Image (cartoon, coloured by chain):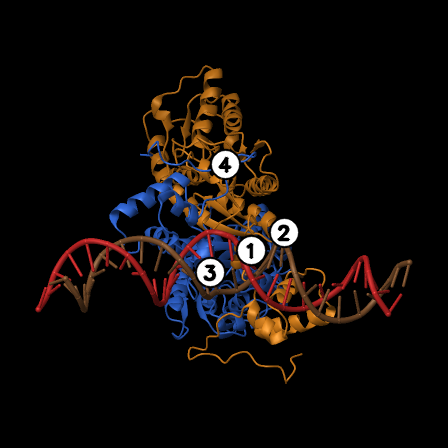
Chain colours: A orange, B blue, C red, D brown
DNA sequence: GAAATATCAGACAACGTTGTCACCTAAGGC
DNA sequence: GCCTTAGGTGACAACGTTGTCTGATATTTC
């Protein structure tokens, strides 16, 4: 519905580029003041419907897109409607599901989400947080991997809202959404013990992380309660990749006194173990329980028994905690423990050889 | 190394909040002008080392974090060092890997990535693009899902760099990174034909998307070249979820004239089919080839033969194309076809029953 | 018909930063 | 000793927007 007599936008430059139009230009085209355009764009009351129409037409014609960053600058203390999510690796399905849950809540509120993976390099954590802080995200959801998050105290004092997922931070206080790593691990290992297993190996991730630590503690709890000795070569930690897990489990099973059951304490490790068991052809004689569910775990034969978290829910809860804190910075911090569920599919129900 | 005599930052308010400090405050504390602080922060030459030291100390003391959004405002025509990635669903491993690839390239350049999933709701595409455009992302990588991307023309003319992954856009021109959906599908189906299969079913995703269309065309190409009739009930399209795929494949295999081989044209569909085949106990008698690789496909028994894309590489290439366009807006657009590979694992090598 | 009130529109400063330019000082050249 | 130059430093405007306030019309009230 463009009127022919309306002035046209400035012609394109040599590269076909026309710089983005501003409120000033919309105002000029509509024949009103800059402020009136601002009012129309923000749907503020008190503009006659005639001017609203004029402005809207001009805005459409110039393909005006408000510059949120400029707006946020002026709206002091106002929000950028932007949050960040800093994870270990988005391509890990566990973290991808967290991101999805966060997005789900954020999009409802018109908030955009920065996603950042830390990769191996845990020292990047602070750098990435600072990069996002410079972009003035309103809040940040972090799966802590650095040894210490004390550096966040200043950020938080400056008004950056924080929530933590998967692991509690060290050195600062904040809202935390975790699963009961220790308890769930303990019950998984107890399940193996109840079947009669005594030679149960623990294969875990990066030992420095609280998550891995808690899962290890849960394993120990169960073993000690049952008064079962843990030979040191049944405890393997700091495993990082599927490939590494496969190699290690293969070696473990070929040792002189192989375990009769495996507790694989992280999803990549579980997958590596699944591979190892199958390539040795012992998937029906050696029991396995994994931490974290994974796709197709139920289709394998036997199905893989796992302690399943609900990462998407964790993401949603974290986002909700973050927005709650943005709404009320003074509210008390809370730790939410999302229950994990032991899903029995067969691999965890294999009894020890007589 | 804080000197005791240095003035202290303003005391915290009642909520423990101290608003973020600005260059002006750093300048006051260091006893220099605002502009000098700016120079130090941006490492511009021509500031005496004494002042550099003073400013740096003041900045640390106040925990100063430059406001990138304000800086970008002034640096007109300058970049926000921010890009967006709009996908169907980050929790799908295929898309998660693309995100990872994009991140990988972006982080090297100090660029932050907005991630957004469209979910079912393809009509959201334009809204999300506009939301990111308002945040003045320098560029956008889009996996098109809406029927038409003509709406992007204005954005691109305003200087928004675009790259497309997984599918070519409709209605605009741009850099595209795709796999050879049609050719790879054709060769997969030909592989089944060469084994002697004639009753080959096609189970595909949302038919309106070019990807699904191309894969279907590849299937038809192979079948027609081999002069094999395609009964209409062997073609099932618009399948969206694992569950749906499972139900449909189950029904198909229980029909009067079940197919002897399946070509499942998308990763979620492949997983559904894997489930269906196994729950019917026919995974060793009905052949299957899937499009897109998935975790553990090789561990299943039989392993699932797939046409594998390299989504992480697709993400990397897309990000590189995007940055190349940012560097030179006038460069010609290109379509990069990333080869897919047929990975034979067993399920695709099952011959038809005699 | 005057005064009081809505209603609407615009001028202006401000947000936190950078680009431009002008200024000051000390060093070097004659 | 004067002029030039280089090296530092700061004042000021500007980026695109919104908050505040003031002003100009209509509309109501008595």
- Discs 1 and 2 carry the same chain letter: no
Q: Is residue B98 left or right of residue C11?
A: left
- Give above or below for A349 relative to A116: above
Q: CA distance from mark 3 to mark 1?
A: 46 Å
Label 3: chain letter:
B
Q: Which residue is mark 4?
A: A166
Q: Judging from the image, what secondary structure is the residue with disc 3 in? A: helix
Q: Residues within 10 Å of mark 4 (few under 14, many from 20)?
A: many
Q: CA distance from mark 1 to mark 4?
A: 30 Å
Depth check: give the residue in front, B161 or A43.
A43
Q: CA distance from mark 1 to mark 2?
A: 29 Å
- Discs 3 and 4 carry the same chain letter: no
Asked whether disc 3 touches disc 4, contact meaning CB atoms under 8 Å apart, the reply is: no
**Which of marks 4 and 2 precedes in the sequence?**
2
Label 4: chain letter:
A
Which-is-in-front pick, marks 1 and 2? 2
Q: Which residue is mark 1?
A: B269
Q: Which mark is residue A188?
A: none
Q: Residues within 10 Å of mark 2 (few under 14, many from 20)?
A: few
Q: Residues within 10 Å of mark 3 (few under 14, many from 20)?
A: some
Label 2: chain letter:
A
Q: Which residue is mark 2?
A: A108
- Discs 2 and 3 carry the same chain letter: no
């Amino acid at each position: 519905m463009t009127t022919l007599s309306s002035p046209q936008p400035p012609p394109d430059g040599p590269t076909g580029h026309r710089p983005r139009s501003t409120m000033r230009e919309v105002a000029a085209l509509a024949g009103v003041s800059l402020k009136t355009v601002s009012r129309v764009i923000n749907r503020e009351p008190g503009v006659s419907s005639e001017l609203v129409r004029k402005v809207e037409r001009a805005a459409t014609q110039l393909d005006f897109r408000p510059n949120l960053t400029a707006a946020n600058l002026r709206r002091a203390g106002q929000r950028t409607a932007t949050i960040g999510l800093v994870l270990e690796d988005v391509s890990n399905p566990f973290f991808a599901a967290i991101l999805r849950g966060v997005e789900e809540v954020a999009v409802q509120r018109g908030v955009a989400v920065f996603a950042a993976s830390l990769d191996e390099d845990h020292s990047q954590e602070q750098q990435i947080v600072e990069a996002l802080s410079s972009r003035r995200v309103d809040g940040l959801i972090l799966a802590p991997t650095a040894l210490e998050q004390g550096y966040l105290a200043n950020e938080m004092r400056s008004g950056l809202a924080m929530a933590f997922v998967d692991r509690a931070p060290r050195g600062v206080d904040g809202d935390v959404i975790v699963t009961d790593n220790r308890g769930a691990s303990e019950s998984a290992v107890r399940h193996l013990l109840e079947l009669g297993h005594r030679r149960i190996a623990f294969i875990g991730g990066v030992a420095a992380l609280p998550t891995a630590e808690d899962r290890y503690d849960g394993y120990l709890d169960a073993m000690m309660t049952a008064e079962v000795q843990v030979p040191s070569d049944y405890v393997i930690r700091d495993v990082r990749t599927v490939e590494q897990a496969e190699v290690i489990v293969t070696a473990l099973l070929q040792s002189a006194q192989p375990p009769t059951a495996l507790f694989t304490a992280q999803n990549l490790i579980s997958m590596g173990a699944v591979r190892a068991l199958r390539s040795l052809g012992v998937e029906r004689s050696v029991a396995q329980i994994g931490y974290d569910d994974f796709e197709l775990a139920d289709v394998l034969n036997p199905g893989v028994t796992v302690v399943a978290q609900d990462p998407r829910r964790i993401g949603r809860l974290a986002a909700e905690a973050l927005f709650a804190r943005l709404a009320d910075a003074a509210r008390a911090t809370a730790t939410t423990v999302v229950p994990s569920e032991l899903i029995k599919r067969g691999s965890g129900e294999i009894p020890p050889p007589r």
